[in-house]
Image: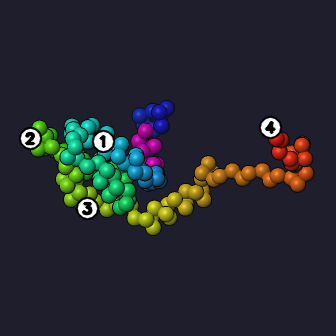
Amino acid sequence: PFLCEKGDLKKLNTFFKDFKLFLPLPDYASLQLLWKTLIVRHGGNLTDSLDIQTLSWICKSAGYTAGSIDAVIKKVLTQRRIQRLPVKPLTHQEFVPHLAKIDPVFKDEYDQFNAWTTKNNPQGKQEEKPKKEKGDKKKDGGKKKKK
């Protein structure tokens, strides 16, 4: 994509418009880092009243993506809300209603994508371990040396 001319870029965009890219859902630690980073990036500040662990647990258990979290933070951190941060710090209760309005990735749908990716991605397959031959034994007859 980086070597495309301007005319080719339109063709490239139309080609990839119909493709969907499967990315695994973030784990709990990644969600905590994601919440902290995106809140600061959108103009918020982190205080003790903001429970990042609860937000991360909700997102992990329900199956929210990084894009969903970004959209929720954009909805909550408006210009007016950013101006009021010194008076009223952020709390996790402000984010939960907006998360409830977004559909998460459901478990059966996620498992279906994950199974397809594992089946069709040769890089995702685990390598088979070479089988040991029966003649391979330790040179010392299998006995342990005593010190």
Q: CA distance from mark 3 to mark 2?
A: 26 Å
Asked whether the beta carbons under mark 3 and mark 1 sit within 8 Å of each other, the answer is no
Task: Confirm whether the magenta stretch covers residue 10.
Answer: yes
Residue type, numbered disc 1: Lys
Closer to the N terminus: mark 3 or mark 4?
3
The local crowd at label 3, few if under 14, some if 14 to 19, many if 20 or more residues have their Cα within 10 Å, is few
Instruction: Check if residue 56 falls in the magenta segment.
Output: no
Q: Amino acid at mark 2?
A: Val
Q: Nearer the viewer, mark 4 or mark 2?
A: 4
Q: CA distance from mark 2 to mark 1?
A: 20 Å
Which is more foreground, mark 1 or mark 4?
A: 4
Q: Which mark is residue 147?
A: 4
Q: Residues within 10 Å of mark 2 (few under 14, many from 20)?
A: few
Q: Is residue 69 left or right of residue 91?
A: right
Disc 1 marks which residue?
36
Q: Nearer the viewer, residue 50 or 3?
A: 50
Q: Earlier in the sequence, mark 2 or mark 1?
A: 1
Label 3, secondary structure: give it: helix
Q: Main secondary structure of the magenta part?
A: helix
Expressed as whole percent of the image width and height from the top left, the position of residue 10 reads: 41, 42
Q: Residue at x 18, y 53 (%)?
A: 94
What residue type is disc 3 on?
Ala
Disc 1 to disc 4, C-alpha distance? 54 Å
Mark 4 residue type: Lys
Judge by depth and name the residue closer to the eye, 6 or 49: 49
Q: Which residues are magenta?
A: 9-16
Work out whether mark 3 precedes mark 1 in sequence or the reverse, and give the earlier one. 1
What residue sits right under mark 2 in the picture? 87
Q: Is disc 3 in contact with disc 2, using a CB cutoff of under 8 Å?
A: no
Across and down, in percent, residue 100 comes to: 25, 61
Which residue corresponds to mark 3?
A: 100
